[in-house]
Amino acid sequence: MEKIQTGTGKKLKSVSYAKWGYIFIAPFFIAYIIFTLVPQLLTVYNSFFETYRIGLQQVGPNFVGLGNYKALFQPDANGTILIFKYALNTMILWIAGAVPQFVIAMLLALFFTSTRLNIKGQSFFKTVIYMPNLIMAAAFSMLFYTLFSRVGPIQALLENWGVIDHTFDFFAIRVSVRGMIALMNFLMWFGNTTIVLMAGIMGIDQSLFESATIDGANSVQVFFKVTMPLLMPIFVYCLITAMIGGIQMFDVPQVLSKGDGVPNGTTRTLVMYLNGYLKTRNLGMSGAISVIMFIITGGLGAIVYKMLSAPYKDQTRKHRERKGNVL
């Protein structure tokens, strides 16, 4: 309850509703602090300690400083620094799935939002392309494992056609396994990306497209000069969220390779590497990997945002300067 002084000297009582805003947003912050912020801080804290379990014996926690981080960058018996190897695997798997994902999603978004084509039944097509996103990644992986296993229908069909023989194994070839993982990631996420890009394109003023067409611009020029600059904030959002999901890739390669990263660890990702330490309750090493992944995600996200947003910000600044000069 607040009192307001009027010009006549009388005080009127008014009700303040500002507190209700804080009450409504409080559950989010409470849940975030308990279930996200505190575990994150504990992860960073545990990364400086040696704590693991051997059988029933618990070792630690013993403070080792940066010892866990140094151990991650030590080469193994074969001279391979595993965290670099698995980071490279993660990047290859993500790029192989993300490039066709964004290309197909952009083409479909332009196709469905084109006023010239005026596609009928858009609701149906939106539902169809989004449906793979509703399937659990584990179920998708089991489906592909069944299809391409030695006793699966793909193997039997190719053998009947004489393309391969019974000694062929899809899961023993690096390219085929990585291709399956990339294909699954593409199928699961291109629909979601398409719908987000469609929403961004539909938010652009249609008069801009009409003006560009009247001025003689073709479809390619309209896309690069009108659509893409105005769609850049949405595109950056999709790219950064896809990149974060790619760095955290786990379920598809985990199920498809049964956690072994076959063949020869070429499909093992950073999170699979992290999961290996969690099985032995090695909280120190797993915490160090989590911190490194956080740094990689933040660094790459900042770089991508700065590189792709710079032209958009420059155009916005120039537009404001021209508008200011006109005024």
Image (cartoon, rainbow, N blue to C red):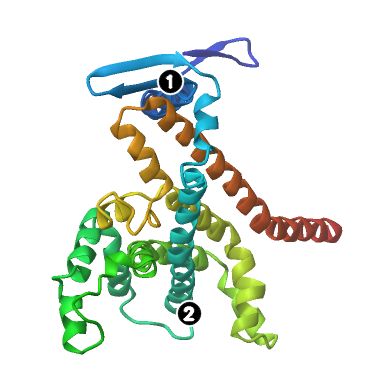
Decide: marks 1, 2 in contact (CB < 8 A)? no
Q: Residue furthest left?
A: 151
Give the x, y percent position of residue 184: 32, 64
Q: Amino acid at mark 1?
A: Glu
Position above or below: 199 against 12? below
- The quadrant of the rendering that contains the C terminus is bottom right
Q: Which quadrant of the view contains residue 222?
A: bottom right
Give the x, y percent position of residue 172: 30, 65
Q: Amino acid at mark 2?
A: Ser
Residue pictured at 37% horizontal, 56% vertical = 264
Give the side of residue 282 with respect to residue 146, left or right.
Answer: right
Residue pictured at 46% horizontal, 36% vertical = 289
Residue pictured at 24% horizontal, 61% vertical = 140
Name the mark on residue 50.
1
Position above or below: 247 against 129? above
SS class of the residue under badge 1? strand
Q: Residue furthest right?
A: 325
Give the side of residue 96 with respect to residue 59, left or right.
Answer: right
Q: Nearer the viewer, residue 260 or 207?
A: 260
Q: Which quadrant of the view contains residue 155?
A: bottom left
- Residue underneath mark 2: 114
